[in-house]
Amino acid sequence: MRQPPHPATADIQLTDVLRVLGDPVRLELVRKLADGSELSCSTAGDDLDIHKSTLSHHYRALREAGVTRTRVNGRERLLSLRRADLDARFPGLIDSIVAASELAVPAHG
């Protein structure tokens, strides 16, 4: 299966990143990925109590903004944070956002 398109590192825009991370669901997904893990799209949002099609919308928004990478492995889609790319473009941004969000919003699970 073809891999979904992702913006090049140089094309990732701060306004796009901040816009997608302004949504609590997407911010929670990024918090889950912040440790460097790769999660299956079918299970990443299990504890969020959100319909599958809505989750797909959030995954796509994150990918199109350059925040996450979606990798197809057989029938599975795996989601990971593009930390190195984001740190190259905006040093410390993801760490700052994740740290601030952990103080403001209790983690699920």
Image: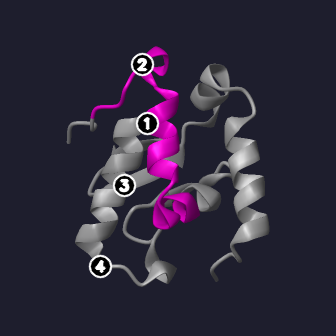
Q: Nearer the viewer, mark 4 or mark 1?
A: 1
**Label 3 residue SS:** helix
* Rendered image: mark on residue 59: 3
- Distance (Cα) linking label 4 and label 1: 24 Å
Q: Which residue was labeled with disc 2?
A: 11
* Residue occupying the point 55% across, 59% down: 27
Amino acid type at mark 1? Asp
The reply, left or right, for residue 100 in relation to residue 85 is right
Q: Quick one: quadrant of the C terminus?
A: bottom right
Residue closest to the eye, 13 or 8: 13
Q: Position of residue 37 (x, y in %)?
A: 62, 53
User: Which span of residues is magenta-colored?
Assistant: 5-29
* Residue occupying the point 45% across, 45% down: 19
**Label 2 residue SS:** helix
Q: Is residue 82 among the parts visible in the rendering?
A: yes
- Distance (Cα) linking label 3 and label 4: 13 Å
* Rendered image: mark on residue 51: 4
Q: Which residue was labeled with disc 1?
A: 16
Q: Nearer the viewer, mark 1 or mark 3?
A: 1
Query: Is residue 71 placed above or below 99 in the rendered structure?
Result: above
Amino acid type at mark 4? His
